[in-house]
Protein backbone atom coordinates (compact mmCIF):
# COMPACT_ATOMS: atom_id res chain seq x y z
CA UNK A 1 0.00 0.00 0.00
CA UNK A 2 1.10 3.56 -0.72
CA UNK A 3 -0.07 5.11 2.58
CA UNK A 4 -0.12 2.91 5.68
CA UNK A 5 -1.65 4.20 8.90
CA UNK A 6 -0.71 1.64 11.53
CA UNK A 7 -2.20 1.37 15.02
CA UNK A 8 -2.40 5.13 15.49
CA UNK A 9 -3.38 6.35 18.94
CA UNK A 10 -3.43 9.92 20.20
CA UNK A 11 -4.00 11.17 23.73
CA UNK A 12 -4.33 14.71 25.01
CA UNK A 13 -3.71 14.28 28.72
CA UNK A 14 -6.28 11.79 29.94
CA UNK A 15 -8.47 12.21 26.85
CA UNK A 16 -8.12 9.60 24.10
CA UNK A 17 -8.72 11.28 20.74
CA UNK A 18 -7.67 8.30 18.58
CA UNK A 19 -7.38 4.61 19.37
CA UNK A 20 -5.95 1.74 17.27
CA UNK A 21 -6.57 3.39 13.90
CA UNK A 22 -5.47 1.25 10.92
CA UNK A 23 -5.96 2.33 7.30
CA UNK A 24 -4.26 1.16 4.10
CA UNK A 25 -4.70 3.55 1.18
CA UNK A 26 -3.61 2.92 -2.40
CA UNK A 27 -1.85 5.57 -4.47
CA UNK A 28 -4.81 6.31 -6.74
CA UNK A 29 -7.54 6.34 -4.05
CA UNK A 30 -9.78 9.15 -2.87
CA UNK A 31 -10.67 8.39 0.76
CA UNK A 32 -13.10 10.34 2.93
CA UNK A 33 -12.94 10.36 6.71
CA UNK A 34 -16.63 10.69 7.57
CA UNK A 35 -17.95 11.21 11.07
CA UNK A 36 -19.72 13.56 13.47
CA UNK A 37 -18.07 16.57 15.11
CA UNK A 38 -15.58 15.49 17.76
CA UNK A 39 -15.16 11.98 16.36
CA UNK A 40 -11.41 12.37 15.79
CA UNK A 41 -11.28 12.71 12.00
CA UNK A 42 -9.47 16.08 11.95
CA UNK A 43 -7.05 14.87 14.63
CA UNK A 44 -6.22 11.88 12.43
CA UNK A 45 -5.60 14.22 9.49
CA UNK A 46 -3.24 16.34 11.60
CA UNK A 47 -1.35 13.23 12.71
CA UNK A 48 -0.88 12.19 9.07
CA UNK A 49 0.31 15.71 8.24
CA UNK A 50 2.78 15.75 11.13
CA UNK A 51 1.04 18.63 12.91
CA UNK A 52 0.41 16.26 15.83
CA UNK A 53 2.67 13.45 17.02
CA UNK A 54 0.83 10.17 17.63
CA UNK A 55 1.02 8.59 21.08
CA UNK A 56 1.29 5.17 19.44
CA UNK A 57 1.60 3.81 15.91
CA UNK A 58 3.28 4.87 12.68
CA UNK A 59 2.69 6.58 9.33
CA UNK A 60 4.35 5.07 6.24
CA UNK A 61 4.29 6.82 2.84
CA UNK A 62 5.53 4.96 -0.24
CA UNK A 63 7.57 2.61 1.93
CA UNK A 64 9.13 5.35 4.11
CA UNK A 65 8.30 5.68 7.80
CA UNK A 66 7.62 9.41 8.24
CA UNK A 67 6.26 9.27 11.80
CA UNK A 68 9.14 11.24 13.30
CA UNK A 69 9.60 13.64 10.35
CA UNK A 70 8.42 17.26 10.52
CA UNK A 71 5.55 18.26 8.19
CA UNK A 72 7.75 19.92 5.55
CA UNK A 73 9.78 16.72 5.05
CA UNK A 74 6.81 14.38 4.56
CA UNK A 75 5.82 15.39 1.03
CA UNK A 76 2.29 16.12 2.25
CA UNK A 77 0.13 19.19 1.53
CA UNK A 78 -2.97 20.24 3.42
CA UNK A 79 -6.00 22.34 2.44
CA UNK A 80 -8.09 23.82 5.25
CA UNK A 81 -11.69 24.96 5.63
CA UNK A 82 -10.61 28.62 5.49
CA UNK A 83 -8.91 29.64 2.27
CA UNK A 84 -5.92 31.18 4.14
CA UNK A 85 -4.89 33.30 1.14
CA UNK A 86 -2.68 36.32 1.62
CA UNK A 87 -4.94 39.29 0.72
CA UNK A 88 -2.01 41.52 -0.34
CA UNK A 89 -0.69 38.90 -2.80
CA UNK A 90 -1.91 38.05 -6.29
CA UNK A 91 -2.89 34.51 -7.26
CA UNK A 92 0.59 33.98 -8.68
CA UNK A 93 2.24 35.28 -5.52
CA UNK A 94 0.04 33.10 -3.31
CA UNK A 95 1.08 30.05 -5.33
CA UNK A 96 4.72 31.12 -5.26
CA UNK A 97 4.84 31.45 -1.47
CA UNK A 98 5.14 27.71 -0.56
CA UNK A 99 7.78 27.29 -3.28
CA UNK A 100 9.84 30.05 -1.72
CA UNK A 101 9.64 28.21 1.57
CA UNK A 102 11.17 25.23 -0.24
CA UNK A 103 13.87 27.54 -1.71
CA UNK A 104 13.00 26.44 -5.22
CA UNK A 105 14.75 28.28 -8.06
CA UNK A 106 12.85 30.82 -10.15
CA UNK A 107 12.64 28.81 -13.37
CA UNK A 108 11.21 25.69 -11.74
CA UNK A 109 8.88 27.81 -9.59
CA UNK A 110 7.40 29.45 -12.68
CA UNK A 111 7.00 26.05 -14.34
CA UNK A 112 5.18 24.75 -11.26
CA UNK A 113 2.89 27.79 -11.13
CA UNK A 114 2.03 27.51 -14.85
CA UNK A 115 1.35 23.77 -14.43
CA UNK A 116 -0.86 24.36 -11.39
CA UNK A 117 -2.79 27.23 -13.01
CA UNK A 118 -3.38 25.06 -16.07
CA UNK A 119 -4.89 22.24 -14.01
CA UNK A 120 -7.05 24.59 -11.90
CA UNK A 121 -8.13 26.97 -14.72
CA UNK A 122 -6.41 29.92 -13.03
CA UNK A 123 -4.17 31.05 -15.89
CA UNK A 124 -6.31 34.10 -16.69
CA UNK A 125 -6.54 35.02 -12.99
CA UNK A 126 -2.85 35.01 -12.02
CA UNK A 127 -2.65 38.77 -11.53
CA UNK A 128 -5.83 39.15 -9.50
CA UNK A 129 -6.01 39.55 -5.73
CA UNK A 130 -8.21 37.31 -3.54
CA UNK A 131 -10.88 40.02 -3.10
CA UNK A 132 -11.27 40.05 -6.89
CA UNK A 133 -12.13 36.35 -7.01
CA UNK A 134 -15.34 34.40 -6.47
CA UNK A 135 -15.61 31.86 -3.67
CA UNK A 136 -15.00 28.98 -6.07
CA UNK A 137 -11.96 30.70 -7.57
CA UNK A 138 -10.52 31.36 -4.11
CA UNK A 139 -11.02 27.69 -3.25
CA UNK A 140 -9.13 26.68 -6.38
CA UNK A 141 -6.25 28.94 -5.39
CA UNK A 142 -6.25 27.35 -1.92
CA UNK A 143 -6.07 23.93 -3.59
CA UNK A 144 -3.29 25.23 -5.80
CA UNK A 145 -1.27 26.24 -2.75
CA UNK A 146 -1.26 22.56 -1.80
CA UNK A 147 -0.80 21.10 -5.27
CA UNK A 148 1.96 23.42 -6.50
CA UNK A 149 4.49 21.54 -4.34
CA UNK A 150 3.46 18.30 -6.10
CA UNK A 151 2.85 16.41 -2.84
CA UNK A 152 2.80 12.66 -2.35
CA UNK A 153 -0.53 12.98 -0.49
CA UNK A 154 -3.09 15.80 -0.34
CA UNK A 155 -5.11 16.25 2.85
CA UNK A 156 -8.34 18.26 2.81
CA UNK A 157 -10.06 19.35 6.03
CA UNK A 158 -13.68 20.27 5.15
CA UNK A 159 -12.55 22.63 2.36
CA UNK A 160 -16.07 23.20 0.98
CA UNK A 161 -17.81 24.06 4.26
CA UNK A 162 -17.87 27.81 3.54
CA UNK A 163 -19.30 27.53 0.02
CA UNK A 164 -22.95 27.64 -0.97
CA UNK A 165 -24.72 24.45 -1.98
CA UNK A 166 -24.49 24.79 -5.77
CA UNK A 167 -20.84 25.83 -5.66
CA UNK A 168 -20.06 22.90 -3.34
CA UNK A 169 -21.53 20.50 -5.88
CA UNK A 170 -19.44 22.00 -8.68
CA UNK A 171 -16.29 21.84 -6.54
CA UNK A 172 -16.98 18.21 -5.62
CA UNK A 173 -16.75 17.31 -9.30
CA UNK A 174 -13.65 19.46 -9.81
CA UNK A 175 -11.75 18.11 -6.79
CA UNK A 176 -12.47 14.54 -7.82
CA UNK A 177 -11.23 15.26 -11.35
CA UNK A 178 -7.98 16.76 -9.96
CA UNK A 179 -7.36 13.62 -7.91
CA UNK A 180 -7.84 11.36 -10.92
CA UNK A 181 -5.58 13.55 -13.07
CA UNK A 182 -2.79 13.72 -10.46
CA UNK A 183 -2.97 10.08 -9.39
CA UNK A 184 -2.11 10.72 -5.73
CA UNK A 185 -4.17 9.91 -2.63
CA UNK A 186 -6.62 12.58 -1.50
CA UNK A 187 -7.78 12.20 2.11
CA UNK A 188 -10.88 14.29 2.70
CA UNK A 189 -12.38 15.08 6.11
CA UNK A 190 -16.10 15.80 6.20
CA UNK A 191 -19.24 15.31 8.27
CA UNK A 192 -21.33 15.67 5.09
CA UNK A 193 -22.19 12.20 3.79
CA UNK A 194 -23.32 13.55 0.40
CA UNK A 195 -19.80 14.92 -0.20
CA UNK A 196 -18.21 11.68 0.91
CA UNK A 197 -20.47 9.54 -1.25
CA UNK A 198 -20.13 11.69 -4.37
CA UNK A 199 -16.32 12.00 -4.39
CA UNK A 200 -14.79 9.02 -2.63
CA UNK A 201 -13.55 5.64 -3.74
CA UNK A 202 -13.62 4.50 -0.10
CA UNK A 203 -15.09 5.88 3.11
CA UNK A 204 -13.70 5.47 6.61
CA UNK A 205 -16.44 6.10 9.16
CA UNK A 206 -14.88 7.60 12.28
CA UNK A 207 -16.58 7.46 15.69
CA UNK A 208 -15.19 8.11 19.16
CA UNK A 209 -11.62 8.02 17.94
CA UNK A 210 -11.89 4.70 16.11
CA UNK A 211 -12.75 3.39 12.64
CA UNK A 212 -16.22 1.83 12.58
CA UNK A 213 -16.07 0.85 8.92
CA UNK A 214 -13.66 1.24 6.00
CA UNK A 215 -14.69 0.01 2.58
CA UNK A 216 -15.81 1.08 -0.87
CA UNK A 217 -18.51 3.72 -0.55
CA UNK A 218 -21.27 1.50 -1.96
CA UNK A 219 -20.45 -1.21 0.60
CA UNK A 220 -20.44 1.27 3.49
CA UNK A 221 -23.82 2.57 2.34
CA UNK A 222 -25.56 -0.69 1.42
CA UNK A 223 -23.95 -3.07 3.94
CA UNK A 224 -23.00 -1.09 7.05
CA UNK A 225 -20.66 -2.95 9.36
CA UNK A 226 -22.03 -1.60 12.66
CA UNK A 227 -25.16 -0.11 14.13
CA UNK A 228 -23.51 3.34 14.23
CA UNK A 229 -22.71 3.22 10.51
CA UNK A 230 -26.28 2.17 9.73
CA UNK A 231 -27.57 5.18 11.67
CA UNK A 232 -25.03 7.72 10.41
CA UNK A 233 -24.77 6.89 6.70
CA UNK A 234 -28.07 7.37 4.93
CA UNK A 235 -31.49 7.73 6.58
CA UNK A 236 -33.17 4.65 7.99
CA UNK A 237 -36.34 3.59 9.70
CA UNK A 238 -35.58 1.49 12.76
CA UNK A 239 -37.77 -1.38 13.99
CA UNK A 240 -36.92 -3.24 17.20
CA UNK A 241 -38.34 -6.58 18.25
CA UNK A 242 -37.75 -10.31 18.64
CA UNK A 243 -36.19 -12.27 15.79
CA UNK A 244 -37.71 -15.53 14.58
CA UNK A 245 -35.71 -17.64 12.13
CA UNK A 246 -35.33 -21.26 11.14
CA UNK A 247 -32.14 -22.92 9.93
CA UNK A 248 -31.44 -21.79 6.39
CA UNK A 249 -34.80 -20.06 6.12
CA UNK A 250 -35.90 -16.43 6.05
CA UNK A 251 -36.16 -14.48 9.30
CA UNK A 252 -38.92 -12.27 10.60
CA UNK A 253 -39.05 -9.53 13.20
CA UNK A 254 -41.96 -9.43 15.64
CA UNK A 255 -42.78 -5.73 15.92
CA UNK A 256 -46.02 -4.49 17.48
CA UNK A 257 -48.00 -7.49 16.35
CA UNK A 258 -46.48 -7.47 12.86
CA UNK A 259 -44.27 -10.22 11.42
CA UNK A 260 -41.84 -8.32 9.24
CA UNK A 261 -39.47 -10.03 6.76
CA UNK A 262 -35.80 -9.22 7.45
CA UNK A 263 -33.95 -11.64 5.15
CA UNK A 264 -31.27 -13.86 6.63
CA UNK A 265 -30.80 -11.58 9.67
CA UNK A 266 -27.16 -12.56 10.03
CA UNK A 267 -26.76 -9.99 12.80
CA UNK A 268 -29.09 -11.74 15.26
CA UNK A 269 -29.94 -15.25 16.41
CA UNK A 270 -33.38 -16.80 16.73
CA UNK A 271 -35.28 -15.53 19.76
CA UNK A 272 -33.01 -12.57 20.45
CA UNK A 273 -34.09 -8.95 20.51
CA UNK A 274 -32.71 -6.98 17.58
CA UNK A 275 -33.13 -3.81 15.55
CA UNK A 276 -33.75 -3.75 11.82
CA UNK A 277 -32.59 -0.73 9.79
CA UNK A 278 -34.42 -0.05 6.53
CA UNK A 279 -33.32 2.94 4.45
CA UNK A 280 -36.15 5.25 3.54
CA UNK A 281 -35.56 4.78 -0.21
CA UNK A 282 -36.01 1.02 0.33
CA UNK A 283 -39.27 1.53 2.24
CA UNK A 284 -42.15 1.18 -0.22
CA UNK A 285 -45.61 2.67 0.17
CA UNK A 286 -48.88 1.61 -1.40
CA UNK A 287 -52.58 2.27 -0.94
CA UNK A 288 -54.33 -0.33 1.20
CA UNK A 289 -57.25 -0.91 -1.23
CA UNK A 290 -57.77 -4.56 -0.28
CA UNK A 291 -54.08 -5.38 -0.82
CA UNK A 292 -52.75 -8.22 1.29
CA UNK A 293 -51.13 -6.84 4.43
CA UNK A 294 -49.07 -9.93 5.24
CA UNK A 295 -45.50 -8.96 6.10
CA UNK A 296 -46.38 -5.26 5.79
CA UNK A 297 -47.07 -2.41 8.19
CA UNK A 298 -50.44 -0.67 8.27
CA UNK A 299 -50.46 3.08 8.75
CA UNK A 300 -52.08 6.37 7.83
CA UNK A 301 -50.36 8.84 5.55
CA UNK A 302 -49.81 12.03 7.54
CA UNK A 303 -47.97 14.20 5.03
CA UNK A 304 -46.12 14.26 1.73
CA UNK A 305 -42.94 16.33 1.54
CA UNK A 306 -41.80 17.27 -1.96
CA UNK A 307 -37.98 17.18 -2.23
CA UNK A 308 -37.66 18.03 -5.91
CA UNK A 309 -36.37 14.83 -7.49
CA UNK A 310 -38.34 12.67 -5.07
CA UNK A 311 -41.05 12.82 -2.43
CA UNK A 312 -41.07 11.67 1.19
CA UNK A 313 -44.15 10.09 2.74
CA UNK A 314 -44.64 10.43 6.49
CA UNK A 315 -46.75 7.52 7.68
CA UNK A 316 -48.11 7.36 11.22
CA UNK A 317 -48.10 3.87 12.72
CA UNK A 318 -49.11 2.83 16.21
CA UNK A 319 -48.97 5.52 18.88
CA UNK A 320 -48.09 8.52 16.76
CA UNK A 321 -44.72 7.22 15.53
CA UNK A 322 -43.77 8.17 11.98
CA UNK A 323 -42.15 5.89 9.42
CA UNK A 324 -40.71 7.56 6.32
CA UNK A 325 -40.86 6.19 2.79
CA UNK A 326 -39.51 7.91 -0.31
CA UNK A 327 -40.26 7.54 -3.98
CA UNK A 328 -39.18 9.05 -7.29
CA UNK A 329 -42.29 7.53 -8.93
CA UNK A 330 -44.88 10.28 -9.33
CA UNK A 331 -47.56 7.61 -9.91
CA UNK A 332 -47.65 6.74 -6.19
CA UNK A 333 -51.35 7.59 -5.85
CA UNK A 334 -51.77 8.24 -2.15
CA UNK A 335 -52.66 11.42 -0.31
CA UNK A 336 -52.68 12.56 3.33
CA UNK A 337 -55.34 10.74 5.32
CA UNK A 338 -55.21 7.56 3.23
CA UNK A 339 -54.70 4.16 4.85
CA UNK A 340 -51.48 2.74 3.43
CA UNK A 341 -49.15 -0.24 3.64
CA UNK A 342 -45.37 -0.15 4.04
CA UNK A 343 -43.03 -2.91 2.87
CA UNK A 344 -39.46 -3.56 1.73
CA UNK A 345 -37.17 -6.04 0.06
CA UNK A 346 -36.03 -8.37 2.91
CA UNK A 347 -32.57 -8.49 1.35
CA UNK A 348 -32.11 -4.75 1.92
CA UNK A 349 -32.47 -4.80 5.69
CA UNK A 350 -29.56 -4.46 8.12
CA UNK A 351 -30.10 -6.29 11.42
CA UNK A 352 -28.09 -5.78 14.63
CA UNK A 353 -28.63 -7.63 17.88
CA UNK A 354 -29.51 -5.06 20.52
CA UNK A 355 -26.45 -4.12 22.50
CA UNK A 356 -24.08 -5.16 19.67
CA UNK A 357 -22.25 -2.96 17.26
CA UNK A 358 -23.23 0.21 19.08
Image (cartoon, rainbow, N blue to C red):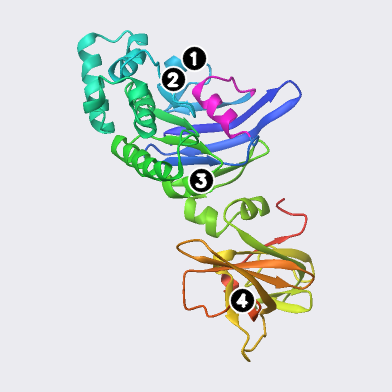
- Whether residue 316 is in magenta: the answer is no
- Whether residue 54 is in magenta: the answer is yes
Q: Quadrant of the N terminus?
A: top left
In space, the residues marked 2 and 3 are separated at their CA atoms by 24 Å
Q: Give the residues drawn in magenta, as a range.
A: 40-55
Which residue was labeled with disc 2? 74
In space, the residues marked 1 and 4 are separated at their CA atoms by 56 Å
Which residue was labeled with disc 3? 203
Q: Earlier in the sequence, mark 2 or mark 3?
A: 2
Which residue was labeled with disc 1? 70
Which residue was labeled with disc 4? 343
Relative placement, left or right, of 27 versus 45 is left
Query: Residue at 25% across / 32% down in the picture?
Result: 121
In space, the residues marked 3 and 1 are separated at their CA atoms by 27 Å
Labels 2 & 1 near each other (Cβ < 8 A):
yes
**Quick one: label 2, few (<14), some, or many (20+) residues within 10 Å?**
many
- In depth, the one of 206 and 97 nearer the eye is 97
Q: Picture quarter containing residue 20? A: top right
Please state which of the two labelled residues, at mark 4 or mark 3, is closer to the viewer: 4
- In depth, the one of 113 and 326 nearer the eye is 326
- Residue 62 in view: no
Labels 1 & 4 near each other (Cβ < 8 A):
no
**Quick one: label 4, few (<14), some, or many (20+) residues within 10 Å?**
many
- In depth, the one of 211 and 278 nearer the eye is 278
Residue 242: x and y in percent read 78, 70
Query: Residue at 64% across / 80% down in the picture?
Result: 340
Under circle 4, the secondary element is strand
Under circle 3, the secondary element is strand
Q: Earlier in the sequence, mark 4 or mark 3?
A: 3
Relative placement, left or right, of 171 versus 67 is left
Amino acid sequence: MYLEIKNIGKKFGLFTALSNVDLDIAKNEFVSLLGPSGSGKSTLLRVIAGLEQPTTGSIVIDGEDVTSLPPYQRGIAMVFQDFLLFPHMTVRENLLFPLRMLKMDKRESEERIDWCCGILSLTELKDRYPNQLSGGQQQRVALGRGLVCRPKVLLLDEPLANLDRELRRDMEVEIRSYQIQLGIPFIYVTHNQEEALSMSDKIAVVNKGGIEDFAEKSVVYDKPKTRFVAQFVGRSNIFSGRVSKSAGGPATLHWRGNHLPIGAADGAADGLHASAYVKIENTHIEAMDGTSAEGKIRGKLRDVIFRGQYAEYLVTVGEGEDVVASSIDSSTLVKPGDDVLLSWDPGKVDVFADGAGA
